[in-house]
Amino acid sequence: MTFRNVLALIAAALCLLALASPLGSVAGVSLSLWDDVGLLVFALALIAAVLGIVSRKLTGGAADIVMLVLPHSGAWYLIARLGIADQDLQAGYWCLVIASWLAAWIFVDQLSAKKPKSPSLQRFYGVVVPVLFGVWLLILWETLVRGFQVPTVLLPPPSMIGARFAASTAILWADFQQTFLKAVLIGYALGCGSAFLTAILIDRVPFLQRGLLPIGNLVSALPIIGVAPIMVMWFGFDWQSKAAVVIIMTFFPMLVNTVAGLSISSQMEKDMMKTYAAGYWQSLIKLRLPSALPFIFNALKINSTLAMIGAIVAEFFGTPIVGMGFRISTEVGRMNVDMVWAEIAVAALAGTAFYGVMNVIERACTFWHPSFRNG
């Protein structure tokens, strides 16, 4: 029996358990699944669908369509039911929530098992699977927080965060400009650029490797909460001090990876360049830098997230009345946790997009690398 069939049988068992369990109570009146036609139809349809998958009577495109529509429509109905006032959710409701999640898991497993020959379809499935995974994290977050009536000051539901996000776009955009477009991008460019040039210098003058690399290691080990206040005193409260923190955080990863990448070329390749009378700079540009590109882009991708973290944390220690770190620290003090999560969402989206851009550029520049040959 496959893992997919095990999930299907568990989902069917949970639906059957929901049919025999109380759904909840409203104003002290106990309700079962038989009192809610919508949820009853959903439970019966889900039982039929998962049993069809186990018996192989539901396969191919029909199975994909059913397992796309059924659990997601059911999840929407289950979340909509959370709006009923004075209700106490019981075992039947939670059985249906878990069954819906398992059905969505089956659908994602079906998509992951597909091996399309078309590169565009491969990229499509590569995007759809993590998106569905993220959507279901939000669905479960919304359901659990509202279902168990978790205080919003501890953890607000995604719907509340989304509402605050939509109502505060002007503030979020100003914070994004201050933190990302100024501190992060400028610090990232200066940190990675200076580290790259330093790596070339170390490669050109080998004895510097013994002196500069330990110093770079020392700088990378400095705690950000200790460096940030010093940078504020040196460069002021504006974005310049945050960019300085980003430079410190991104310098060492870029330096180490570039030095390692420049040494990856084999001695045979270097000897071949010498037989063609190639000088140092010709060998560097035509042989060693192309070989080092995977290492360099690895550092660029690592630094794309480190830069965001460094800039936000640095803003905790002094900034104008704008910026993601400033907003997070201020709104936490005011107990506006939904605004804090909205800022976190902006930071996560910006960091993910930045990482994705670096990944796309890497793919364009290192298409010859074995890891991309099948892409």
Image (cartoon, grey):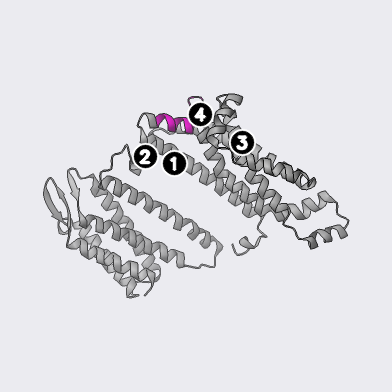
Q: Check the image and report above or below for 34 versus 63.
A: above
Residue behind mark 1: 345
81 or 328: nearer the eye? 328
Counting residues from the N terminus, which is met first, the one under dot 3 or under dot 2? 2
SS class of the residue under badge 4?
helix
286 or 252: nearer the eye? 252
Amino acid at dot 4? Phe
Q: Which residues are magenta?
A: 315-331
Mark 1 and mark 2: Cα distance apart in space: 9 Å
SS class of the residue under badge 2?
helix
Residue behind mark 3: 187
Amino acid at dot 3? Gly
- At x 20%, y 45%, the residue is 84
Q: Is residue 99 left or right of residue 178?
A: left
* Residue 215 shows in this picture: yes
Residue behind mark 2: 161
- At x 37%, y 49%, the residue is 138
SS class of the residue under badge 3?
helix
**Is label 3 in contact with label 2 (beta carbons under 8 Å)?**
no
* Residue 73: % across, % down: 31, 56
Counting residues from the N terminus, which is met first, the one under dot 1 or under dot 4? 4
**Is label 1 in contact with label 2 (beta carbons under 8 Å)?**
yes
Mark 3 and mark 4: Cα distance apart in space: 17 Å
Quadrant assignment, res 237: top right
* Residue 115: % across, % down: 50, 68
* Pair 4/2: label in front: 4
* Residue 205: % across, % down: 80, 45
Residue behind mark 4: 317
